[in-house]
Image (tube, helix red, strand yellow):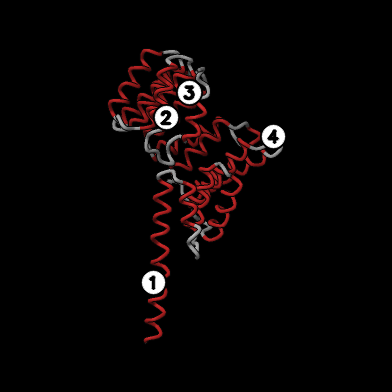
Amino acid sequence: MLRQLGGLIVAVSLYGGALPVYDQARELYERTAYQESLANLNKVQQKDAEAYELIGQNYFMLGDYKKATEYFDKALQLDPRNSEIVHWLGRTYGRRAETGSFLTAPSNASKARQYFEKAVELDPKNQEAVNDLFDYYLEAPGFLGGGLNKAEELAHHIESLNPAEGHYARAQIDDKKKDYEEAEQHLRKAAELAPHQVGRVVDIAQYLAKVGKFVESELMFDKAAKMAPQEPKVLYHRAETYIKSNRNLPQAKKLLEQYMQSKLTPDDPSRAQAEGLLKKIPN
């Protein structure tokens, strides 16, 4: 009995010691302190699938996609039916396709599609995986497994999961078909179905600017800013929209500088992306 109790105490102390370190690493990741998060994870001796996944996410956010692949693979070996891990592998191969050489891009793009499809197969309700697969089908050429027909078919599934997101998908399809008025109406319907999601208003604002409706775009950005005054994405996407349309550039610079001082999360565009936009503004 004493031996069993002693063994239990040792096990609890080891496990209990690892949990706070992991939790701190997760918190650092959520604050975009990726290097610090990795330093904490290196202290965890017995790493499980969740720890390997978080290491992979940190490397992904740091732009080291080969390292990210390595650790997502390790996570998947321990938890082979985890849709989220499979989805992250898809994202990683997608970035490797975007940033690698033209020789490796087709292979990496195909792997991205395969992992996205597998993630959706494992969990058809994994909304982020479904959305990434939709984007792939919409943008990739047919010889890499993309296609508008596939995107349209998947849009039905998206709508069954989230009606607002379904209308957003329809808007992207209509835009691809150059049916701009219909695309705008789908974006407005998405915002109507999700009235508290500021991102839906930003989507409309960006699209109105894209089709040259700048006055209406400004009104929608103003609405978004009032809805969520502290939301960094509103700052970033407003600045990005100004830069794309080559207008209000001094204001775009101020917005990006404010954005870079904001508390960001991994879901926000990175500070490096903001710096990249700043470099596009003439001095």
Query: In the image, is residue 207 above or below residue 92?
Result: above
SS at badge 2: helix
The residue that mark 2 highlights is 168
The residue sitting at 62% across, 38% down in the picture is 97
Q: Which residue is mark 3?
A: 174
Kindly report which numbered mark, 1 or 4, lies closer to the viewer in this rendering.
1
Distance, label 1 to label 4, CA atoms, is 51 Å
> What kind of residue is marked 4?
Phe
Q: Specify which label sits upstream in the sequence, 1 or 4.
A: 1
| Residue closest to the eye, 124 or 52 | 52
Above or below, 151 against 54 in this view is: above
Distance CA(mark 3)–CA(mark 2): 10 Å
What is the three-letter code of the residue carrying label 3?
Asp
Question: Relative to the observer, which residue lies in front, 1 or 131?
Answer: 1
Residue 12 marker: 1
Circles 1, 2 touching at the beta carbon (< 8 Å): no
The answer to which of 148 and 51 lies nearer the viewer is 51
Does residue 39 appear left or right of residue 225 in this picture? Answer: right
| Sooner in the amino-acid sequence: mark 3 or mark 1 | 1
Q: Nearer the viewer, mark 1 or mark 2?
A: 1
| Residue of label 4 | 102
Image location of residue 195, percent across then percent down? 29, 30
Disc 1 crowd rating (10 Å Cα; few below 14, some 14-19, many 20+) is few
Name which residue type carries label 2: Tyr
Question: Disc 3 to disc 4, how far (Cα)?
Answer: 30 Å
Q: Nearer the viewer, mark 3 or mark 1?
A: 1
Quadrant hosting residue 194: top left
